[in-house]
Image (spheres, rainbow, N blue to C red):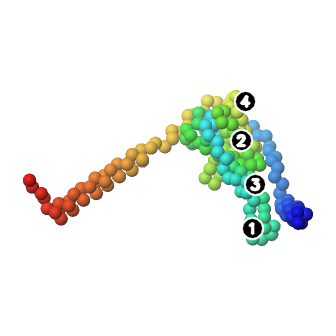
């Protein structure tokens, strides 16, 4: 029985491997800082404050109704890295900004390190990869010399709408309390001592 299962496993593995139309390889052309500045939507320097893996191992397999029925996607998993942004050279971004990077050509950032990051908007997220000039800030001398001093990031959106919501809730509670008091007086009358 185990020989039969082994044969079935080998056949399925070969079928999945041979049914792929493209190999997963990264080939990058090395562009100058100014050329990549033109291609990127956002270029900034910042410190990594959090990094989260997004997805799980089966996310790189997609099932279809037509042949080859099973296909491998480009993203084995993704990583969402949040930066505390210090300097911006291109784009409008906030002081805390997240960037998504995925396998097999993803660039993975280390917590606590400072980087220069090149990214583009993709499906509502900033995305980057191995082929961009992402680099630790201490090794990005050529980029820093080409771009100059930059500008500070936009401040994160304030929490003022939260205060407005709280005030609305307080006014609604006061209105309900007043309405309940009015209903009680109307039903039971005013008690005098």
> Which tag, 1 or 3, sits closer to the chain's start?
1
Mark 1 Cα-neighbour bin, 10 Å: few <14, some 14–19, many ≥20: few
Are dots 4 and 2 in contact, CB under 8 Å? no
> Which tag, 4 or 2, sits closer to the chain's start?
2
Q: Name the residue beneath numbered marker 1.
A: 64
Q: Which mark is residue 139?
A: 4
Q: Position of residue 191 (x, y in %)?
A: 12, 57
Q: Secondary structure at mark 3?
A: loop
Are dots 4 and 3 in contact, CB under 8 Å? no
How far apart marks 4 and 2 lie (CA) works out to 16 Å
How far apart marks 3 and 2 lie (CA) works out to 16 Å
Q: Name the residue beneath numbered marker 2.
A: 108
Q: Which mark is residue 6?
A: none
Which mark lies nearer to you, 4 or 3?
3
Q: Name the residue beneath numbered marker 3.
A: 74
Q: Residue at x 39, y 50 (%)?
A: 165
> Which tag, 3 or 2, sits closer to the chain's start?
3
Q: Position of residue 189 (x, y in %)?
A: 14, 62
Relative vertical location of residue 124 with respect to residue 184 in this rendering, above or below? above
Mark 3 Cα-neighbour bin, 10 Å: few <14, some 14–19, many ≥20: some
Q: Position of residue 44 (x, y in %)?
A: 63, 37
């Amino acid at each position: 029985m185990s020989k039969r299962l082994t044969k079935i496993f080998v056949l399925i593995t070969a079928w999945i491997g041979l049914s792929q139309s493209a190999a997963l390889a990264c080939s990058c052309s090395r562009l100058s800082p100014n050329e990549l500045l033109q291609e990127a939507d956002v270029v900034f320097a910042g410190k990594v404050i959090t990094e989260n893996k997004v997805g799980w191992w089966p996310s790189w397999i997609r099932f279809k109704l037509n042949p080859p029925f099973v296909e491998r996607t480009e993203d084995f998993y993704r990583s969402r890295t949040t930066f505390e942004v210090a300097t911006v050279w291109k784009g409008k971004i906030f002081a805390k900004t997240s960037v998504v990077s995925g396998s097999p050509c993803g660039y993975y950032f280390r917590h606590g390190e400072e980087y220069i990051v090149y990214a583009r908007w993709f499906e509502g997220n900033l995305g980057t990869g191995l082929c961009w000039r992402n680099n630790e800030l201490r090794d990005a001398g050529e980029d820093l010399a080409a771009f100059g001093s930059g500008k500070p990031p936009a401040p994160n959106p304030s929490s003022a709408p939260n205060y407005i919501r709280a005030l609305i809730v307080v006014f609604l509670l006061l209105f309900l309390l007043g309405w309940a008091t009015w209903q009680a007086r109307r039903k039971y009358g005013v008690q005098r001592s």
